[in-house]
Amino acid sequence: MKKMLQFMLFIIALTTYAQEKEKLVQLTPEIADSICIQMVGLVDENIQPQVAIKKNLISHKVISKNATKKGIGDFINKNFKNLIDRRNIVSSSVKEQHLYQRAFDGSVLNFFYDVVLDEEYEIDINLTFSDKGKQRTLLDQINYLLNTPHELILYDKDTLNDIRDEIIEVGGKTVKELK
């Protein structure tokens, strides 16, 4: 009788676990828009980038609550080209921005130190995204900002150079170098 009761409790617990298991959704353009813009908003609320990105992805049900840094990195690597904010929020000349561009424009430079360059996330540093029809890596984007006077005035040059140096140190390349 005792074994039967234990077995029934086990089945109930297993059924409850299966019912409570999170149902994850696929990344859609609307979710990507929201992830990109909320990333900046959450950091504006003084939430550290690594906490903000996890909170953001969990709130959209694209990763589980138990996701590790590697799990978050896997999501970013898998969906990298689709992490685009397609809303025209910056100016009429900017039609869309990749998550990395949103992080730069929102002055969330710690995102690169705390997430992208953190080895535990295992983010592929040489993934490319499209910017006005051109493919860019993160290193290309930083080089662009450093070499474009009207862009550079918006950033701390030393910080950009520090991020650039770290990217190169971990094997970061330009699109040209990848060919």
Image (tube, rainbow, N blue to C red):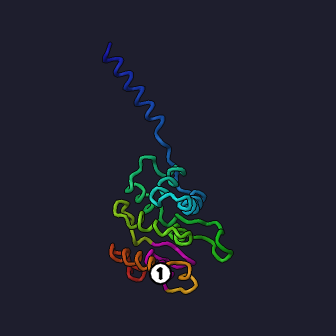
**Residue 32 appears in view:** no
Corner quadrant of residue 95: bottom right
Looking at the image, residue 107 lies above or below residue 179: above
Across and down, in percent, residue 174 comes to 41, 80
Does the magenta-highlighted stretch encompass residue 143? Answer: yes
Does the magenta-highlighted stretch encompass residue 57? Answer: no
Residue 179 placement, left or right of 148: left
Across and down, in percent, residue 131 comes to 54, 76
Looking at the image, residue 80 lies above or below residue 131: above
Q: Quadrant of the N terminus?
A: top left
**Residue 59 appears in view:** yes
Looking at the image, residue 139 lies above or below residue 113: below
Instruction: Determine the residue located farthest toward the top in the rendered image.
Output: 1
Corner quadrant of residue 123: bottom left
Identify which residue is drawn at 50% across, 52% down: 55
Q: Quadrant of the C terminus?
A: bottom left
Q: Which residue is mark 1?
A: 157
Looking at the image, residue 155 lies above or below residue 40: below
Q: Amino acid at mark 1?
A: Lys
Viewer-nearest residue: 137 or 106: 106
* Secondary element at tag 1: helix
Task: Identify the magenta region.
Answer: 128-146
Identify which residue is drawn at 53% across, 61% down: 43
Across and down, in percent, residue 153 comes to 55, 82
Instruction: Determine the residue located farthest toward the front in the rendered image.
Output: 46
Identify which residue is drawn at 56% across, 72% down: 105
